[in-house]
């Protein structure tokens, strides 16, 4: 296990108007490891990811990347650091082929002409590096790919740029059993290649299958950051639903502080 | 059919296509709903046969040459519209925009005594300005393009009328402008032009195969590449042969032969826009915004700027169409760019294979669709049908083309090839 974290978030606060969505949230990502980010709907997972990727600006908190404190103000800052996000709705263009999608917005050119051979070669190298051998042609339109293949292209697009941290938002949510296994294998391989991987998932089986660490969010707070080997399935479920489990998680008073917001369930 | 497996430099195993597998793939795409320009080309052949049998004059070289200048305005507007359609937008004002630009040129030439080299740029700049305003309202203010350009359609009609002081016909006498749509290249220049076009196409095709093969990437089979080159060569040489024949009704008084000047003008813009769409970053981004605007935005593409730019291109092409229309008619009147021009242009793009739903279309669609429209208009005119019948026929064909577009899209969604 690597000693120094690749990406470390500390004390992140984020409010939308009067609603504070993130309270003092922390997240640590180590190179070569998959960190699962879990939490119920509305726990702040997506908000946290959008803060890291520069789509939202954070109100308070520090981001340490590779030991240096950095500022992420917009998506370009995040991309420059090597932080890439694969969103749930894949953000691929159906009418473009695999190579065109992988290089979208960052096309290689010679003069003003697109350098197709170089792009095709780089795309092929990247897919081969991820041990993807299932596509018929790199010039296949994305529209003709299966859900798992699309996810693969989206992930390959994220790692093409020598990225260091790849954040995957629910990559298996829409996939069948066999394709889920393929994508999880790919996620594992990203980490084995030395990247820091953040996997957002609702599926405990997926989390326990690939993750080395688990960070649980509960109502905008970090409930726990634990190693997968130290916890059980049901402990994580408790952390997600109640914010604490045994001696893990938020102190009791903090956990209950927020419970009374649920309509019709006043204490 | 033998397929040998090869490996690209990246190590992803792909099947090396043979001539047979290439044709097979093409057939598969057709069956999957990706028809491209095929229906339009078949339609063009059928229409030419019908009109050719019914009226001998249809196939004469004189009539063939006429088709170029008759179809020029529609083809130019359609080429611009392809860009707008690629984003799933529409420009209903392109017809009158071309009329306004033509009128700007004519009024400057005739009423203000400007020369062609200042009046033509003025018309082109007018086109750019119109396109920018339309695009700005669509992209930045978020008004649907249908509404913006419908308003502009009405507005430009009024601008045209006021430019012409309430509808006076302004005729032009500038020889350069008149030559654009009415004169031909000499026989020698015509042949040179034809040879340059063929050699250029062959060089581009062979160079692509060579550079890809040098990198160890999959190339189109040589047989297919050669078939493409020979096919284009036959079409160009045949057309040039016909057009360099004497076609004057009375050759003793005046000799008329050579390729119309309009042809190379169309060819140049066709090549430019094909290059822009298929080989530049900008073109790639236009397709991306048309395919999935959100994905394009996340990829860091300035979606608004792309959206404005396609309207600029469309109105710019309309301005050239307007200049050619004025040149052909020797004058401008309140109906230049009006009546059926816009509908013919949208029809040309869609008939040629551009999709009304965005994300699919090429410059060649406008060229082929424009040819279909010109042939219908010209052929039915020769057969003595009234304008009413012509409109009905064109309307039906546009409807058929739009149905083909919608149905092939549905089929593509079902088979996953789009």
Image (cartoon, coloured by chain):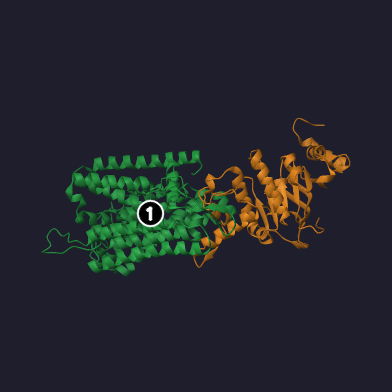
Chain colours: A orange, B green
Residue B16 seen in the figure: yes
- The quadrant holding residue B199 is bottom left
Q: Where residue A134 sits in the image (x, y, percent)?
A: 59, 48
From the viewer's side, name the closer residue of B40 and A17: B40
Residue A48 seen in the figure: no
- The quadrant holding residue A123 is bottom right
Q: Residue furthest left?
A: B252
Q: Where residue A38 sits in the image (x, y, percent)?
A: 75, 43
Q: Where residue A33 sits in the image (x, y, percent)?
A: 76, 52
- The answer to whether residue A185 is left or right of residue A256 is left
Q: Under tag 1, what secondary structure?
A: helix
Q: Please identify the quadrant where the C terminus of chain A is shown.
A: top right
Q: Where residue B178 sits in the image (x, y, percent)?
A: 24, 63
Q: Which residue is mark 1?
A: B364
From the viewer's side, name the closer residue of B97 and B393: B393
From the viewer's side, name the closer residue of A3 and B384: A3
Crowd tier of the residue under label 1, counting other residues whose Cα lies within 10 Å: few below 14, some 14–19, many 20 or above = many
Q: Residue furthest front?
A: B2
Residue shown at the point (24%, 49%) measured from the top left: B378
Q: Please identify the quadrant where the N terminus of chain A is shown.
A: bottom right
Q: Residue furthest top?
A: A264
- The quadrant holding residue A99 is bottom right
Q: Is residue B127 above or below residue B54?
A: below
- In the rendered structure, the residue with mark 1 lies on which chain? B
Residue shown at the point (71%, 43%) measured from the top left: A201
Residue shown at the point (62%, 51%) measured from the top left: A132
- The answer to whether residue A22 is left or right of residue A113 is right
């Amino acid at each position: 296990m690597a000693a120094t974290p690749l990406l470390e978030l500390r004390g992140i606060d984020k409010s939308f108007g009067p609603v504070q969505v993130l309270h003092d949230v922390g997240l640590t990502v180590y190179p070569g490891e998959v960190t699962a980010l879990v939490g119920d709907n509305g726990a702040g997972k997506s908000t946290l990811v959008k803060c890291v990727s520069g789509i939202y600006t954070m109100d308070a908190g520090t981001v340490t990347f590779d030991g240096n404190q950095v500022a992420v103000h917009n998506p370009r800052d995040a991309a420059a650091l090597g932080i890439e996000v694969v969103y749930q709705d894949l953000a691929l263009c159906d009418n473009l082929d695999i190579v065109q999608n992988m290089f979208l917005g960052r096309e290689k050119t010679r003069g003003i002409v697109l350098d197709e051979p170089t792009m095709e070669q780089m795309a092929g190298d990247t897919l081969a590096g991820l041990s993807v051998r299932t596509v018929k042609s790199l010039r296949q339109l994305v529209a003709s790919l299966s859900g798992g293949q699309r996810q693969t292209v989206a992930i390959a697009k994220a790692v093409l740029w020598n990225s260091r941290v790849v954040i995957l938002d629910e990559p298996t949510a829409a996939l069948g059993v066999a394709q889920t296994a393929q994508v999880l294998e790919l996620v594992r391989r990203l980490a084995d290649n030395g990247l820091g991987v953040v996997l957002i998932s609702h599926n405990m089986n997926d989390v326990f299958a690939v993750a080395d660490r688990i960070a649980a969010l509960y109502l905008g707070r970090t409930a726990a950051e634990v190693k997968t080997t130290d916890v059980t399935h049901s402990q994580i479920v408790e952390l997600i639903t109640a914010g604490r489990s045994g001696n893990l998680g938020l102190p009791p008073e903090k956990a209950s502080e927020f419970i009374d917001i649920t309509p019709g369930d006043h204490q | 059919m033998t397929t040998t497996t090869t490996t690209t430099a990246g190590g992803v195993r792909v099947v090396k296509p043979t001539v047979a597998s290439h044709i097979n793939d093409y057939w598969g795409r057709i069956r999957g709903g990706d028809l491209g320009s095929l229906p339009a080309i078949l339609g063009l052949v059928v229409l030419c046969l019908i009109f050719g049998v019914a009226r001998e004059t249809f196939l004469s070289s004189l009539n063939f040459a006429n088709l170029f200048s008759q179809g020029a305005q529609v083809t130019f507007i359609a080429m611009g519209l392809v860009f707008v359609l690629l984003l799933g937008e529409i420009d209903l004002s392109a017809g009158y925009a071309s009329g306004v630009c033509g009128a700007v040129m004519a009024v400057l030439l005739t009423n203000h005594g400007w020369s062609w080299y200042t009046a033509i740029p003025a018309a082109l700049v007018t086109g750019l300005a119109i396109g920018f305003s339309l695009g700005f309202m669509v992209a930045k203010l978020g008004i649907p393009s249908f509404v913006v350009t419908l308003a502009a359609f009405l507005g430009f009609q009024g601008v045209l009328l006021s430019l012409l002081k309430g509808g006076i016909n302004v005729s032009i006498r500038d020889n350069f402008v008149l030559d654009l749509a009415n004169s031909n290249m000499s026989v020698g220049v015509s042949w040179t032009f034809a040879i340059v076009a063929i050699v250029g196409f062959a060089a581009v095709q062979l160079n692509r195969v060579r550079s890809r093969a040098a990198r160890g990437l999959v190339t189109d089979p040589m047989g297919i590449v050669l078939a493409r080159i020979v096919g284009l060569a036959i079409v160009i040489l045949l057309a040039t042969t016909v057009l360099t024949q004497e076609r004057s009704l009375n050759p003793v008084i005046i000799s008329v032969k050579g390729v119309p000047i309009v042809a190379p003008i169309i060819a140049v813009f066709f090549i430019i826009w094909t290059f822009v769409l298929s080989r530049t970053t900008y073109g790639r981004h236009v397709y991306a915004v048309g395919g999935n605007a959100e994905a394009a935005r996340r990829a860091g593409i300035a979606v608004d700027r792309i959206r404005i730019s396609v309207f600029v291109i469309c109105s710019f092409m309309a301005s050239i169409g307007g200049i050619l229309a004025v040149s052909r008619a020797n004058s401008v009147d309140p109906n230049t760019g009006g009546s059926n021009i816009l509908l013919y242009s949208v029809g040309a793009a869609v008939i040629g294979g551009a999709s009304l739903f965005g994300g699919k279309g090429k410059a060649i669609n406008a060229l082929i669709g424009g040819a279909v429209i010109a042939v219908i208009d010209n052929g039915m005119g020769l057969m003595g049908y009234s304008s009413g019948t012509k409109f009905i026929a064109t309307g039906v064909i546009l409807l058929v083309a739009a149905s083909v577009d919608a149905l092939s899209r549905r089929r593509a969604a079902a088979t996953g090839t789009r």
